Image (cartoon, coloured by chain):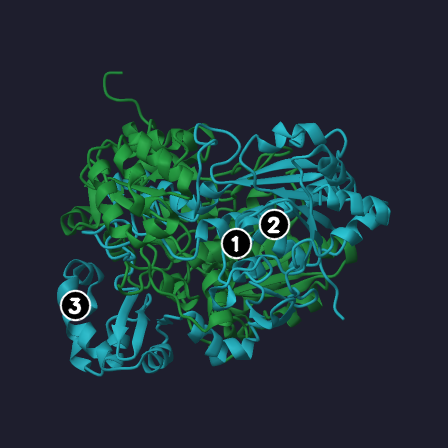
Amino acid sequence: MSDLALDDLRVIDLSQGIAGPYCAKMLADCGAEVIKVEPPQGDYARTLGPFPDDVPHHDKGGLFIHLNGNKKSVTLDIETESGRIVLRKLLARADALVESYAPGHLTSLGLGYDDLKDEFPDLVYCSITPFGQTGPYSGYRGNSLTCMALSGLMYITGDPDREPLCTGGEPAEYFAGLNAFIGVLAAVEHRASNGGGQQIDVSMLEALGAADEYNTTLYSFLGAIRKRFYSRHLFAYPADIYPCKDGHIVVVPGATGFPLGMAVLMEQMELEQNPLFANLWMRSIQWQKFEELLRPYLLEHDWRDLLTRAQELRMPFGPVMSPRLLREDEHMKARGFFQEVEQPELGRTQVAGPPFKMSETPLRSGPAPTLGEHTQDALLELGYDAEEARILRERGVT
Amino acid sequence: MAGLPLSGIRVLDLTQVYAGPTCTRILCDLGAEVIKLEGLKRTDITHLLVIADNDSHDDFWNRMGYFLYRNAGKKSLTLDFSEPDAVELLKRLIPHADVVAESFTPRVMAQHGLDYESLRKIRPDLIMISLSGYGQNGPWRDYTAYGMGLEPASGISSLTGYRGGEPLRTGISFTDPYSGIAGAGAVLTALHYRRRTGKGQYIDLSEQEAAIPIVGYALMDYALNGREPERIGNRSPWFAPQGCYPCRGEDDWLVLTVRDDAEWQAFCEVVGQPKWAGDERFADVLGRRRHHEELDELIASWTREQGHIEAMHLLQAAGVTAAAVLNPKEVLLDPHLRERGYFETIDQPGVGPRPVPRQTGARFSAFDVSTRAPAPKLGEHNKEILQGLLGLSDEEIAGLEERKIIGDKPELAAGEDLMRMFVQWPVTTFLQMGAVAALEPDYKQQLGLEQKAGE
């Protein structure tokens, strides 16, 4: 069995939803022991589905399983003093805490960073919130949609004559999750060379906003306020999704695709001389004329055929994948991307594999815990006896 | 940089454009010394994107906004790999490197004898990361890839689009920064392992795969129910109403999510519509979902009379999840982001101070991840690195310059004069097309970078 890169770390995951749990899952998949501390009713992501046959069940939610593989679940009501005492015992043995409560909430429970830093001077305390711990919007409510809106990314996505469009899949949450993953690792490295823990403040809005490609730059360098224009890349038209015979294809001719490669692909060599093929700015400006040439050809051909031939011509066309296409795709199979885990209550279940492959310390895939699956074990490990564990359970603390 | 987590770590950065440079920029912010390598015949294409003030005099390739954002703080070394001598110099740098990052298609590094197996013979504990479109193996391994193609390849675009409409891309190459962030996490993980064990390793990051977890909900729905996702525009699979609504200004919009019945009551009260609160059709989430279109009409009838930013503050004060859809200028001027110091002012030589968003999304209490320098000029650190690390003589440096293995000017295939014209962006044409909403010549004053005349 190969090594796990982070198996010297223990993390308390007090977060719920998507961003914090994804951060903690990355740590767990890389080998950290992650104890997910959930309120007795469970992380609210357990209620978000999708459920088999749409029948809700707190241990069968697809999104929860996606975000919590390889963790242990301990239920604990930290709104009670009895619960907080157990949490402190867990923190005494932990390297990092990941949390996603609204700013100030944990402080109101005596669990803010300043409350804990003297007791746990080496603790890395990572907070993930929509807008960060400080600033005028820190108390505001947010989600991926509000972050898409305030980051400027939504304004530039969609059709010019319609409302701005948010990107599917709650992306701001995942951007924040990865930034928090980086944050925890960087703080652990810092602790190794300089000593001491610290507080990390991850704002979903900033994590997503930093992804901006050139839109704030167009203003700060040229004074141009870019507007959405079919989500088109302004420096590389067409570089966009088009319908084809059996679905969709991303037409990306790349830096050297025009005019020759595109003329060859479209089997009309005279197009090489067409100024719409030869001149980028003319093509971008007279795009309707260009698309009168492009679209009919695409509609007569299958995406796999277009993709294969374009790639043979060294043009970086791309496929438009759906969950089904990803699961059935030969490339994904050859890469072994999807992993099968033995998920309690569901049996063998296919889950997404890791976002990168490491030669010496491959990331692991594992099932998500059922609600409170590890509460008893954790309590015994902390030194409580079976009788005390029963009392905590019956008093609703765990 | 003492006191930063990656101080003492040196990264050789062979990546270009967006994903790889984001990865190494984060490592740089965290204290690593990042040396960006470019061939003079194969300079990073972002040396041609977004020129300051649309003015392409002199060394225009050193004044690009796109390049600045993702390369601030790095050092620049030019080395043309088509020359065997350049490859040898690169190999001589490997003992001085902790990390090598590259983003070519998989065959390229091996062609030059620079694959991981070869490099780790030179430095056994080397960490190397390859960021490629589709990964290092499998039938698509040799496919070339740009970020514009990879967001759809990861499945995200199948979820993005107006209701009942075509799949759409985000208005940026969305998976590029995401892969870069994931890559930085991978390198940090590998450094942690190396510190414990002394072992290096190789990281294979497929940009397509890296972003697939973003569509986790839809993947699981397919795994559990065999169901493919529908495009639902700005609506939510869980909450109702949710959407994007027109405001008073010409292209001003507001997004909002009503997460539960209490928020619905609060919303009706704050917008002064008690009769909506009492309407049985909208009393519960299922009713609001069923009557979403009627609700959208009603909500829009209120938002049309509101300023988008004022409406955000009003609704948030009442506990409703809402946000203004900011345009890029409004983002630059947003008071929350400004107070948090989200934009750093970087004084780029030849350009002057400009606001650049922090590329590392985490803030740390024990150290500051501020950018430490502007972006390097092309070849700015040739001498420093080749003499400082490899001990080359002045004569040897001059010989390399003469053979154009190193230098400070790109060898542009189309010729310098043509590129000088090309990089001037036809802004007024884009304004006429509608891809640019407005053009403001006084943008430096608006951003507070220059004083207004007479002040």
Q: How far apart are marks 2 and 1 (CA)?
A: 9 Å
Screen quadrant of the C terminus of chain B:
top left
Q: How far apart are marks 2 and 3 (CA)?
A: 54 Å
Q: Earlier in the sequence, mark 1 or mark 3?
A: 1
> Where is B441 relative to A272, above or below?
above
* Chain at numbered mark 1: A
Q: Give neighbour class at mark 3: few <14, some 14-19, many 20+ (Cα, 10 Å).
A: some
Q: Percent position (x, y) of residue A254?
A: 33, 67
Q: Percent position (x, y) of residue B172?
A: 35, 54
The residue depicted at 77 percent of the width and 58 percent of the height is B198
Amino acid type, mark 1 = Thr
Q: Can residue B62 be seen in this view?
A: no
Q: Name the residue under label 1.
A: A47
Q: Percent position (x, y) of residue B314?
A: 33, 29
* Chain at numbered mark 3: A
Q: Colour of chain B?
A: green
Q: Is mark 2 on a helix, strand or loop?
A: loop
In the image, which is nearer the foreground, mark 2 or mark 3? 2
Q: Mark 3 points at which residue?
A: A290
Amino acid type, mark 3 = Phe
Query: Pointer 2 and pointer 1: residues touching (CB < 8 Å)?
Result: yes
Q: Which of marks 2 and 1 is nearer the N terminus?
A: 2
Quarter of the figure with residue B218:
bottom left
Q: What element carries label 1?
A: helix
Labels 2 and 3 share a subunit: yes
Q: How far apart are marks 1 and 3 (CA)?
A: 48 Å
The residue depicted at 46 percent of the width and 41 percent of the height is A206
* Chain at numbered mark 2: A
Q: Colour of chain A?
A: cyan
Q: Name the residue under label 2.
A: A42
